[in-house]
Image (tube, helix red, strand yellow):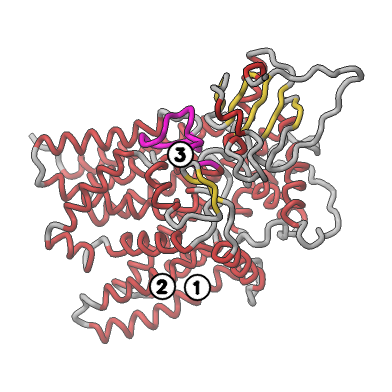
Amino acid sequence: MTRSPWRRVVASWWTLVFLLAGTGGLIGTAMLRNSATFDEIVMIAAGARGYQTGAWDLAPEHPPLVQYLYGLPVWLTRPTLPQERMAPVRGDAMVHRYNYARQFFWSMGNDADRLLFLGRLPAVLCALALVLLVYAITRGSCGPGAALLAAALVAFLPDVLAHGGVAYNDLPLALAYLLAVWWLDRLVRAPDLARAIACGAACGIALGVKNSAVALAPVAVGLLVAEALVRPDRRAWFARVLGYGGIALLCAYLMLVVSYRGDFLLDEYRYGLHFVFGQVTSRPSVAYLLGHISSGFWYFFPVAFLYKTSAALHVLIVVAAIAILRQRAGWRMLQGGPLPAPALALLVYFLLLLSARQHIGFRYALPALPPLVLLTAAGVARAWSGATPWLRRGMLAAGVWAVLHPLTFYPYFLSYISEYGPGRDRNYQVLVDSSLDWGQGLLALRDWMRREQVGRIYLSYFGSAVPRGYGIDYVPLPSFFPLPVLPRAPGDTVAPRWAAISATNLTGTYFVGDPFRSFRAVTPAAILARSIYVFDLRELAP
């Protein structure tokens, strides 16, 4: 006896509820075991400061919506703010914001762990909202089976699990970008007033989250062209979409004005665009990939994709691509069916990534992953309907493995490297910086020192947090941000036996010369949070 459609719907929703609960639990418990990461302390401190003082100029090149988001729960606890100083001199603004954030967390008597926990909670909600949105979009176009597959694949993407516990703007952008693309698609297909308002609001929100949301403009153009190719009533449709499109643009502008607190000229927004795109497109950063240091790699993001997503997902992508492209019905899905929006969203963002010259983390590619998963789920659903039993078993195994493999990195999802890596002990040979090591390992280092009864350690740390704020006594080694020298008791001249070196620093990426080259030839005594390497200095002694 087959189940009724209503029972299938109920079962689908209960599965989604369990999926959300599991994802939220994993992200929430994992974030408690990761120390403050590189940029999130600035985002949280800037938000709390803005609410309390009305000044939102600590990180003006970033749109303010995520500062509002992460700063609100922290500000509601009425934390003590650092004393304001005069505006930083030119070239000192970046140093000033990190110094301010460090003081806010660790020098003002605030409970740093509590502030970090509260600031990260909105990121967890964004991750869950992204899973729900992917489910809703896929269900409406491809049915409940494909929707659950898409939701599961997104929920267990390593970077969703990682950045769902980090108070920064990459995951909120992935959510806002997908939402805006969905409303753009709906407006283009059936223009009306309600959709124009919703589309404009969604696009304005995305632009207020991160500047790279300008990718929505070419997506909109592509959707218009794709729809025009299949419309029999092209002239009447174009007149409607032109009128309601103007309303959508007005709503997007007004949403930005609201985001920037009534700035009708959008001076701050234009400054942020100029700063960020000047930096991303014309100022190459130091980049590391597969053991090589360069001013950039044009192929950084395609290669990083292979290492930051599971091999099982890659198998499903290949199966989906074959299923979609081998049939005429598949081509119709890409033309007038449900898939042009995610396909264009993926293509445009991929081209944007290829043009960027900032290769410091795969997190920049996060907004491209949900559209890719949508396409994958749609293709797998099509392949499933005509597959042999053995092929179905293979697809099922790949789906299960795509979920399970990232979980083996719990609770340090930021350090995820796929099955292609050289082994978890040496994953720094593939990627570093925010793709592997974003400063999340201080809690693990503190716990190791207590467990091994190590009182003091040599430390080279890649991050912006204050190691002393986590109870770590150290002697500073070269670090990305120079570590302050801690006071010593009179006559205390005993040198530490152990050296702890962050993975990024171990590669020498941001240093002149290669100060830790000799350490890479030695087996570490411990690897903490998969991002901090501890060495016994007696093994390096001549």
Asked if the residues shown at circle 1 and circle 2 are in contact, with their CB atoms under 8 angstroms apart, the answer is: yes
Q: Quadrant of residue 53?
A: bottom right
Q: What amino acid is labelled 2 in the image? A: Ala
**Looking at the picture, how far across and down is residue 331, in whole percent?**
18, 63
The label number, if any, that marks residue 196 in the structure image: 2
User: Mark 3 near mark 1, Cβ–Cβ under 8 Å?
Assistant: no
Mark whose residue sits in front, 3 or 1:
3
- Identify the secondary structure beneath mark 1: helix
Whether residue 336 is visible here, answered yes or no, is: yes
> Observer-nearest residue: 186 or 301?
301
Stretch of the chain drawn in magenta: 413-432
Q: Is residue 437 magenta?
A: no
Q: Amino acid at mark 3?
A: Leu
Q: Residues within 10 Å of mark 3 (few under 14, many from 20)?
A: many
Answer left or right for 329 relative to 255: left
Image coords of residue 249 (percent x, y)? 47, 76
Precedes in sequence: disc 3 or disc 2 = 3
Q: Is residue 416 rendered magenta in the image? A: yes
Query: Which residue is at 39% across, 75% downward?
Result: 193
Q: Earlier in the sequence, mark 1 or mark 2?
A: 2
Q: Image check: 126 left or right of 91?
A: left
Nearer to us: label 3 or label 2: 3
* Residue that carries the numbered disc 1 in the rendered image: 251
Hey, what amino acid is under mark 1?
A: Cys
Tag 3 residue: 161
- Residue drawn where x is 75% and y is 57% of the image: 93
Tell me residue 5's x, y (percent): 17, 44
User: Badges 3 and 2: C-beta atoms under 8 Å apart?
Assistant: no
